[in-house]
Image: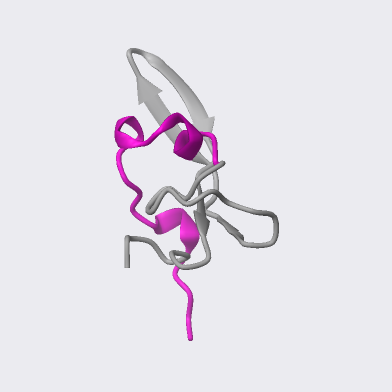
Amino acid sequence: MVMADLGDVQLPRFGTLTQRQQRGQDCVWCGVTLAAGHVVDLGPRRYRRAGWSTQWFPRACKKHPAGGAR
């Protein structure tokens, strides 16, 4: 099985996520609390708002490694 580049995975809009999802504590798709060893790092993403830019580091549970709420 060939895995997609996780940097290309389409994520939910940043503003629609809870603070815990934005901080990488919860899965960006289903919201489950993430535990060590059961996490997929989706790579750094750039976020721009109101003229400033920063990076965030989304994470997902292992049920959603290739993206989307499946």
Say if 54 sits above or below 17 in the image.
above
- Relative depth, front residue between 27 and 13: 27
Closer to the camera, 5 or 70?
A: 70
- Residue 67: give x, y in percent of width and height: 38, 61
Name the outermost residue toward the front: 33
Residue name at image x 33 percent, y 60 percent: 68
Residue 66 x, y percent position in the rendering: 42, 66
The residue at 41%/30% (across/down) is 47
User: Is 62 displayed left or right of 8 in the figure?
Assistant: right
Badge count = 0
Single out the residue that lies furthest toward the top: 51
- Left or right: where 49 falls relative to 40: left
In the rendered structure, which segment of residues is drawn in magenta?
1-24
- Residue 41 image point, x, y percent: 57, 54
Where, quadrant-wise, is the C terminus in this rendering?
Answer: bottom left
Asked if 62 appears above or below 42 in the picture, the reply is: below
At horizontal 31% and vertical 45% (from top left) the residue drawn is 12
6 inside magenta stretch: yes
Residue shown at 47% from the left, 65% from the top: 65
Residue 23 location in percent, x, y?
A: 54, 34
Image height of 35 relative to 2, above or below: above
In this view, the residue in front, 7 or 34, is 34
